[in-house]
Image (cartoon, coloured by chain):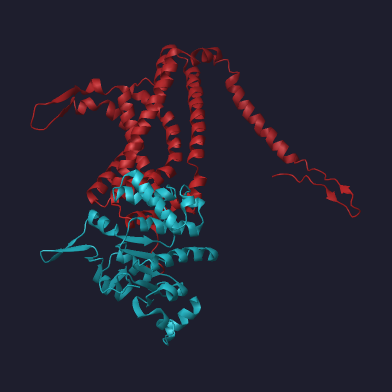
Amino acid sequence: MSESNSLLVQAKGVRKSFGTHEVLKGIDFQVHKGEVSVIVGPSGSGKSTFLRAMNGLELIDAGSLIVDGEQVGYSLSDGRYREWGDGDWAKFRSRIGMVFQRFNLYAHFDALENVAASLIHVKKLSKAKARERAREQLDRVGLADHSHKRPHQLSGGQQQRVAIARALAMDPDLMLFDEPTSALDPELVDEVLETMKALAEGGMTMVVVTHEVGFAREVGDSLAFFDEGIVMEKDEPELLLKTENPRVRSFLDRVR
Amino acid sequence: MTRRTAPFIGPQGEELSIARRWHIRRWIVGAIALAAVLWFVSIFVFSDRIRWERVGEYLFYEHILNGVVATIWISLAATVLGLVLGVLFAIMKLAKNPVLKWIAEAYIWFFRGTPVLVQLIFWFNLALLLPYITLKIPFTSIGMRWDTNSLISGDTAAILGLGLNLSAYFAETVRAGIMAVDRGQTEAAKAGGMTSSQTMRIIVLPQALKIIIPPTANEFISMLKTTSLIVVVAGNDLMTNASNIYKQNNLVIELLIVCSIWYMFMTAIATYLQSLLEKRFGADRVRAIRGTSIGQRMLDAATGAIRLPVRNGGKGAR
């Protein structure tokens, strides 16, 4: 894996509360370009919230979160941080791919239209060109034959692969995966993990929130354990999996 | 309940027949109910005060047929106006801009808070308020001016009154529809780089409309009959035309029967169209796409505001 020095994600002291409940209590986190960064942790540990903060689906309350060169939600001008407008957000998010736990494919579109939608409306490609590119992306995840199926006609694993193709089609600098296999039947998990492994081996920068420790061991460059809103441990996967920390130990023993 | 058809098999493998129950009480209650209905109907059918031959005569009378056509077109126009404005006000009410939200809320409050009859009479008498309607480019003399009385006929007043009234109710239906679309759809669109308006236009609204379309047929059916209120502003709909006739010849009941037959006929047709619509945008298909039932989602959306405070807010995968 290419270990360049440029940081794609740089979080310092990130805090976030929902009402009176503090979910993120000062997260420090870095992702280098080309790195596959895996985050595990119990539910409620804040790992999904942190992931969603990276493309602004959640707004942080304090700290600094720089993603792809931008302080998420603000641009610095004349010594002040100006809040982003709708268009700024859209432009930023078009550079960051996101894959959700529950796929979130557009229910009224078929697979091809799902992939083509942002190419047409955001990248402003012609319809023909967008469809051509969408077809290539579906082919890349092995679903070229299913391009005219609606989401409900696809299995969970296929839906998630379409979702991955949809995010990849935008040619993102960074891919975020929010528990991509948690909503899948066990026998469908592997096809999604295989797609993600191929992507990781292709050099894509990825942040993956998951319970699949095996995935982290195979292709992860780093593995972080989140607990109660902080990064409890972060290390190379092989090392973290051998940790002596009892809290991490007991969690890892359960998910394995 | 379906009845068992297979016979029982006895110990020697022989078939044992089943003695059917007669359900005597069902027959008795049914017979009494039927008798009551027949007696009630017979009061009308055999009344020598209703001249049925006149009902038949007026059923296809030209003036009545014109009224049927007018009723259909006024209903259609008012429904279309109501739908378009309803979508607009629903989006305004969900907007982040507080001014738009207040305007939409005030509009919905006003049109749901005043009787449609009052609104009809108001629009019909708009000339009292605005004798002329002028459209001109500001600071120039280029423009047009109309005499309000000639512009607002009974039909226009009807379409405006009924359409605006429907839009206020429909705005709430659309709002519930929009809120029933899974939040994940919005998140996916935003994550894909769409702006808020693109997300609404390309992703949310088409799915919301799919949920909303079947109930619109209901609104239309209701509108067909609400048009009968136009009688107060002298449109030329079915009810107005019928009342013009009975005011002259005093065949009140006969013409009301004529009207009822036509309204029921139009409702039957509309109900049939509704069933086609539901087949096309079937709730089943929408449910298959989204998992949970739409009714449940609509209910959730409608009652979302009164959710009780949850202690561990924010726990779990967010």
- Residue A40 in the image: above or below residue B135: below
In depth, the one of B26 and B139 nearer the eye is B139
The answer to whether residue A203 is left or right of residue B7 is left
Chain A in the picture: what colour? Answer: cyan
Q: Is residue A128 visible?
A: yes
In depth, the one of B309 and A10 nearer the eye is A10
Q: Residue at horizontal 31%, vertical 66%?
A: A53
- Percent of width and height locating residue B43: 59, 22
Q: Residue furthest right?
A: B12
Q: Residue at horizontal 49%, vertical 24%?
A: B260
- Percent of width and height locating residue B189: 34, 54
Colour red, chain: B
Dividing the picture into quarters, in which one does residue A102 lie?
bottom left
- Residue A166 in the image: above or below residue B245: below
In depth, the one of B295 and A190 nearer the eye is A190
Q: Is residue B179 visible?
A: no
Label count reads 0
In depth, the one of B3 and A153 nearer the eye is A153
- Percent of width and height locating residue A104: 42, 56
Q: Residue at horizontal 27%, vertical 68%?
A: A60
- Percent of width and height locating residue A244: 42, 88
Q: Residue furthest bottom?
A: A244
Q: Residue at horizontal 41%, vertical 69%?
A: B316
Give the quarter of the figure containing the N terminus of chain A: bottom left
